[in-house]
Image: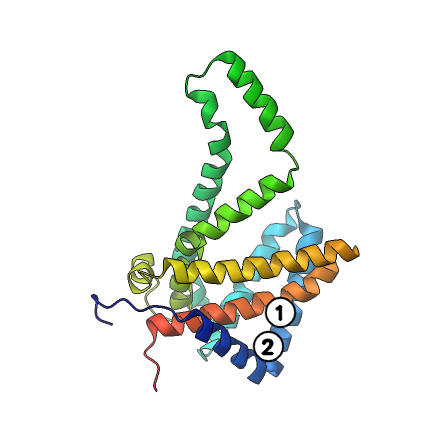
C-alpha cells in the first residue's frame, strides 16, 4: 500500500461481512464459542487466584489458534508463531497497564497541586464517597477505555494478528496502515461496548447470574474477533475482487 494512501475502514461493511462469515461457518464457530464460554466461566471462579495466570495462558493460545484457523495458516497451533507474537502482545499489555496507572493516578492529582489543606480534606471526602463502588465511576472508566481503545487496543491488536500468521508484527506497521481511522475504530468500540452494556443491564434487570450473561458474551466475543480479522484483511491483505 502506498504510504501516502489513507484507507478508511468501512465499519458497516466489515460488520456485515463478519456476520456473513460467522453465519456461513457456524459449524466451525460453534466449538470456538463453546470453549470461549468455558474460559469465561472459569474466569469467574479463578478470579483473584493463582490459577488465573494459567487460564490467561490458555486464553492466549486459544485466540492464537483461532486467528490461524481463520486465515487458514496450518498448523493452527504453531509454537514459533506463538513466540513471535509475544512481542506485540507484550507491548499491548504495557500500553494498557500504563493507561490504567494513569487513570488510577489522575483522581489524586489535585492533592499535589498546592491547594489549601481544607480543600484537600474535602477532596479526600469526595473521593471516599464517590470513587468507591460507584456506578458513575464505572461508567467514567468505561468511557475512557472506549475512547482510548483505538490507540491502545484495536490498532495494536492488528499487529498481534499479523505476527500470528507470519507477517510483520511491529506496532509501527499497524499504526501506519491504520492511520486516519481513529473514528472508525472508535465506532467499532462504541458498538460493542453498548452491546455488552445492554446485555449486562438486561441480565441485571431479570436477576440472571453472571454465568447466564456469559452465554451471550461468548459468541459476541468470537464475533468481535472475526470483525477484527476482517479489519486486518482490509488494511493488511490485498483482497481479490
In the displayed structure image, the side of residue 20 where residue 208 appears, left or right: right
Q: Residue at x 30, y 62 (%)?
A: 173
Placement of 216 over or under 112, stated as above or below: below
Relative image position of residue 177 (x, y in whole percent): 30, 65
Relative image position of residue 131 (x, y in whole percent): 60, 33
Which of marks 1 and 2 precedes in the sequence?
A: 2
- Residue underneath mark 1: 219
Relative image position of residue 184 (x, y in whole percent): 40, 63
Foreground residue, 153 or 72?
153
Residue 108's tag is none
Q: Residues within 10 Å of mark 2 (few under 14, many from 20)?
A: some
Q: Considering the numbered disc 2 on the image, is that residue within a helix, a strand or a loop? A: helix
Placement of 214 over or under 105, stated as above or below: below
Q: Residues within 10 Å of mark 1 (few under 14, many from 20)?
A: some
Q: Residue at x 37, y 73 (%)?
A: 234
Instruction: Mark yes or no: residue 95 visible.
Output: yes
Foreground residue, 84 or 208?
208
- Residue underneath mark 2: 29
Q: Residue at x 56, y 17 (%)?
A: 121
Quarter location, residue 35: bottom right
Placement of 96 over or under 69, stated as above or below: above
Instruction: Mark yes or no: residue 85 visible.
Output: no
Question: Which residue lies most toward the right here?
Answer: 207
Q: Quadrant of the C terminus?
A: bottom left
* Tag 2–tag 1 contact (CB < 8 Å): yes
Q: Residue at x 64, y 47 (%)?
A: 50
Placement of 24 over or under 234, stated as above or below: below
Foreground residue, 107 or 201?
201
Q: Considering the numbered disc 1 on the image, is that residue within a helix, a strand or a loop? A: helix
Q: Nearer the viewer, mark 2 or mark 1?
A: 1
Amino acid at each position: 500500500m502506498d504510504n501516502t494512501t489513507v484507507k478508511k475502514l468501512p465499519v458497516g461493511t466489515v460488520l456485515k461481512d463478519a456476520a456473513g462469515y460467522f453465519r456461513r461457518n457456524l459449524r466451525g464457530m460453534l466449538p470456538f464459542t463453546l470453549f470461549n464460554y468455558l474460559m469465561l466461566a472459569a474466569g469467574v471462579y479463578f478470579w483473584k487466584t493463582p490459577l488465573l495466570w494459567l487460564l490467561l495462558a490458555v486464553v492466549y493460545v486459544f485466540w492464537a489458534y483461532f486467528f490461524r484457523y481463520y486465515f487458514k495458516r496450518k498448523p493452527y497451533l504453531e509454537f514459533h508463531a506463538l513466540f513471535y507474537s509475544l512481542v506485540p502482545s507484550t507491548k499491548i499489555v504495557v500500553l494498557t497497564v500504563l493507561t490504567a496507572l494513569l487513570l488510577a493516578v489522575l483522581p489524586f492529582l489535585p492533592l499535589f497541586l498546592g491547594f489549601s489543606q481544607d480543600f484537600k480534606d474535602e477532596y479526600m471526602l469526595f473521593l471516599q464517597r464517590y470513587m468507591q463502588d460507584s456506578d458513575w465511576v464505572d461508567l467514567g472508566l468505561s468511557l475512557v477505555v472506549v475512547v482510548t481503545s483505538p490507540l491502545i487496543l484495536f490498532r495494536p491488536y492488528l499487529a498481534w494478528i499479523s505476527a500470528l500468521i507470519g507477517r510483520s508484527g511491529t506496532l509501527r506497521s499497524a499504526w501506519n496502515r491504520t492511520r486516519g481511522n481513529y473514528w472508525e475504530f472508535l465506532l467499532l468500540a462504541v458498538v460493542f461496548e453498548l452491546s455488552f452494556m445492554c446485555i449486562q443491564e438486561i441480565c441485571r434487570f431479570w436477576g440472571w447470574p453472571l454465568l447466564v450473561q456469559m452465554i451471550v458474551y461468548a459468541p459476541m466475543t468470537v464475533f468481535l474477533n472475526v470483525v477484527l480479522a476482517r479489519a486486518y484483511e482490509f488494511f493488511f491483505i490485498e483482497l481479490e475482487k
